[in-house]
Structure formats: structure tokens, C-alpha cells
Image (tube, rainbow, N blue to C red):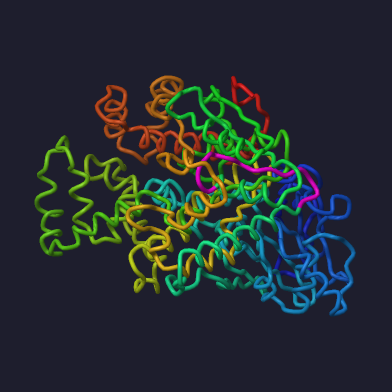
Amino acid sequence: MCGIAGIVSSDLTERIDAGLVHRMCQAIVHRGPDDEGILAKRNTGLGMRRLSIIDLAGGHQPISNEDGSIWIVFNGEIYNFPELRPQLEAAGHRFSTNTDTEVIVHLYEDMGAACVEKLRGMFAFALYDERRQKLLLARDRLGKKPLHYAHRDGQLLFASEIKSILAVRPELAEVNPDALLEYLHFGYVLDPATAFTNIHKLPGGHLLEFENDQVRIRKYWDVPEYSTYEPQSEEECLEELERRLAEAVKIRLISDVPLGALLSGGTDSSTVVALMARSSSRPVKTFSIGFKHADFNEAQYARMVADRFGTDHHELILDPEVVSTVEQLTSSLEEPFADSSMLPTYYICCLARKHVTVALSGDGGDEMFAGYERYGIQQRRQVFARMPAWAAKFYRERIFPRVPRSTYGRRFSYNVSLPWRERYVDEMSFLPAYEREMPLLSDDFRASVRDHDPQARMLASLDGRSGLDPLSQLLYLDTKTYLLGDILTKVDRMSMATSLEVRVPLLDHELVEWAAALSPKWKMRGGQQKYILRKLAEHVGVPLEVLNRPKQGFALPLVDWMRHELKDLIQTVLLEPRTLQRGYFNPAAVRYILDQHFRGRRNQSGAIWRLLIFELWHRNFLERVGRGEPALQASGQMASLGGGTP
């Protein structure tokens, strides 16, 4: 696991200064604290920061082919490299290291850009072919590892994090208002956009080729067709799922450094731990956190799983210093990011990093096997599809505006009047419901984004998939948007802030392809979500108390914090003149939201959190960049967690 960065110029006479590449690498030291490698060769500069996982002594990057005409910097893990290497050696290739990185170089020699189709793992890499004067960027199929780029003045700049690009080209910190609108809708920015107009994300499953000052991007993988496979029996389905997930777990146990698992006590992580215990010759190291607030302390469920599988369990009950952690993390976030579960994710990564360098997690099970409650909610709301379209439109346009804001069920009535796809996206969107109550956006900001429709852009991800059954459409949509932009982004940023590598076996692409092909009845049946995955969890011995508890996710006492620890910060930050004068929001609407929450009239914690993170991102990241200062790095030091009971 590493961080990568670099610059390639289309002007073959230009010389890229190694100092510039070093500056880009220094911005991402947290991603790779063990080593730095730089290649500055004529018009090309490649750099990396290394977190040593495999071939600790010999894995220094950049790595080249035999004659030094092809160079690569790589972030990630290729789990099938032990199978690929003998094939390449048989074809005449000579290896100088024992790394998975070098496999990519020799595959490229044989296959060109199509080499990515042979790779099984998580990755983002930059490969420069000196003979063809071509740069190849690639990102893994599901987008587990990030990769950003900017094409400017004949140069292609790339990096694992935006801050590396801004470290050498601060003028690119031009805020993208359309992206900020997407954040206010969904809590994150949809790929391929970023919060900056001239910096872009390479989407998962895509390649970028830079040649003759031209950027060409193409898709090399997508989730295959849904609902094409119908097992003959539950036993057949269960056996195949167990075989595939057990293999996905086993190949992710390859490591030359200590390895463990993040254990939340939910179905997904518990199943992963059960399969790890089966494949490991020694007790699996597991890590969980809880909060002193009793309603949000799920540590007991993780403890049950640890006891059942005899793990070497580490637990921390937190009473964290929330204010300092929030300010610290918003200093390192390059885009506003509203998923409050980034806090417990960060805390558990801090705990795990004290003991291991690599950890497996249970992320991805909800998107693959229909685990979110919203799938069931939308299924039940399908009854409203019987409403004539003309009547629904009449209600939204003529009746709804006359319904008093205080009327119970007002938001619900608007939502169910929408066509079902729009209803689903509206349910996930924060901003529209508030705009329908009292305009939250300022007139100026609304005018600047009037031609951008974030909900339509999200739904555009379904192009070509509209013939699927409704559940499969929602699973595909979430895989291409929420999983990529929220879940995987959160896991990568919070784990890398602590220099911890996280591997996600439930998102092994071969398992994803198989799960997508399953008919919907194996994912949701009789109102039970994740039907076949829960059956597997039970089969491998996950305690029934864990499986039958209400789904909570990585919950935290946000409402309580906002009325106590965070209250002063919220009121100070959101009501300060410089906040209200930025020009994004209607000050009266901001005061209305705060007043409703603090007087107990309505729980507005989600809205307040989104506004708070937005403003703190401006102050702690964007303003520092604007002043030419380096953005602060999140630290893995446990001091930021406050009081805790190990």
C-alpha cells in the first residue's frame, strides 16, 4: 500500500524537477511512511510513498522492466501475483524483486493496457512507456484505491490525493460549485468530479492514456448483468457463496507484516472473521470500538464474535475528544465529506494500527446482497406507483406548496408522489427536502448551479440498466455511486490517515460478478435483507444474537454530541459572520435549522453535521491551500481519541 504522484509533460524537451515530485510525495507521507522513491527522467517524474507490506527489503519503487524503458508507481495489492509471476517467467521475463508491482510491468510488456484485465486486487497505478512516450493510469474495478489527475499546460499531473497536485499547482484550487451542490445533496461528490473544477477522479474500472498531449479515458470493466443465475437449491447457492468468499478472504491474508480484522459485530465483518479464523494457523487479531453512551455501544456483539472464534481481541470504549478530532480530520479532507461514520472508522483504524499494518473489513456486503433498510422501504413504497402520473404531478405542483410546513408527513407525501427511481434518489438527498421547506441556498449560489441537477446525474449511472428488476437497479446504482463515493472513500481516507491498509474481501471482483448474477430472491426474501449472506453467517457459526439484532451500522451518538460537546463549536462556526457571508446559504434558513434542533422541535443533526463539515472544510483545508500553506495531515496518534478503556 502506497501513495503515488507524478507529472508527465507532452513537451519532450521539458525536464521535470525531482524536487517537484518530492513535494507532491511529502503531501501524502501518511499513506506511505516507510519509504520514498522518485524517478525524474527528462519529461517524466514519478513518485511514491511506501507502506511496506510485501517484499519488505526489495520492494522499492519506482520499478522498471528489464531494459528500463517502462516504469511504474503502484498503490494497492495484487492478490493473484503468485499465479501470474510463473507464467511471465515462462514467457521469458526476468524479475528483480518479489513484489506484486513488478508483475504489472511485465504484463504490460505482453498485453499493453489490457494487462489490467488480468489483475485481481485493489490498485491505482501510473505506468510510463518511454518508447511510446505514453502514460497509462489505471484504477481497480470497484474504485477501492483513489486516483486523481489534472491536465494543464501540456502536463498531466496525477496523485492518490488532491493535496499532492495542489502542493505544486495551488492555482488549481478553483472551487467547483456543481460539485459542492452534489455534496449538499448526497454528502459526497460523484465521480469523476472533485471539489475543484480542473482536478478529476479517474472512475473505478477505467483507464487513462496520456499521449501527444491528449487524454483518452475508457472503461475496461463494469458490474456484469444482474439476475442471470438461478441456483437449483439453497444448498447449492450457500456452498458456492461459501467457497467464493472463503477464497477471497484467504488470498487477502498474504502479507509480510502483522494482519488483523476490523470487527464491528455486524453480519459482514463477523462472517469475514469466521472465515479468517478457519484459514489462519494462529488466533486472528480483531479490533472493535464502543462508546460510553450506552445506546451506541455495540462492542458486546463484537466480543461475542471474538469469543466464538477465539480471536486475539482488542477493544476500546471511547469517550473521545470530538471537537479536536473533527477539526483534525477536516484539515486533511480534500473535499467536504458528510458521512459521520468516518469518526468511528478513524478511531478503529487508530486502534488497529497500534498492533497491525493490514486489516480486513466487511465493507461491501450491503451493496452486493441488499443490506440497507432503504431497499425494503422502497419495495414497500412501490404501492404508490399506482397513483396516476398526472395526479402525482398535480399534487407536487399545486397542493404540496399549500401544505403547512409543520404538517406531519409532509416530506413523506412529496417523496411518494415521485416516480420510483426519483423517489429513491430523493430519499437519499439532503438538500431538496430543506429547499422545499425554506430555501437553504442563497440566491447567488442557486443561480451559479441552476443548470446542474445532481439527482439526474446520479440517475444517469443507470443508463443501460433500466430493464433490470427494481432491486437490481438500486444495487447497481449504489455500487456505482454510494459505495464508490462514500463507503470506499471513507475507508481509504481514514485508514490511510493512520497508515493502515484495509482489504475488503466482499468486494473481490469475481465474487461481485457472481453476486450480481444471483436473482433478487437470494438477496431479499420475505422482507429479510442479505438473505443468503445471513444464511452463510449462521452456517459458519456467527452467534444468532449478532445476526438477529437490529441493523445499526457504524452508529455514533451524534445527536447527543451536538447538544453537548459539539454545541459551542456548531453555534460559533455556523453563525459567525464569515460563515454566513460566504454566499452559499440563506442565513435565516441556517438559524432556523439550529433553532429547531437546540429547542428540541426536530432532530436536525444530519443537516447540522453537513453544514458544519462544509464550513470546517473551507477553513481547515481550503483556506490553508489558498494561503499557500500545506494542508494538515491527519495523525494516527491515539491522543486524539480522548479517554478510553482498552
Q: Is residue 184 left or right of residue 437?
A: right
State whether residue 330 is above or below residue 64: above
Residue closest to the eye, 92 or 189: 92
Residue closest to the eye, 283 or 141: 283
Q: Is residue 9 left or right of residue 233?
A: right
- Which residue does the image show at 78% across and 67% down from the upper left? 103
Residue 356 pos. (x, y %): 73, 39
| The quadrant where residue 97 appears | bottom right
Q: Is residue 99 left or right of residue 266?
A: right
State whether residue 575 is above or below residue 221: above
| The quadrant where residue 63 appears | bottom right
Marks counted in the figure total 0
Residue 436 pos. (x, y %): 22, 45
- Which residue does the image show at 54% across and 45% down from the upper left? 542
Task: Reply yes or no: does residue 264 show up in magenta.
Answer: yes
State whether residue 392 is above or below residue 628: below
**For the magenta stretch, what is the residue range?**
255-268
Residue 520 pos. (x, y %): 39, 64
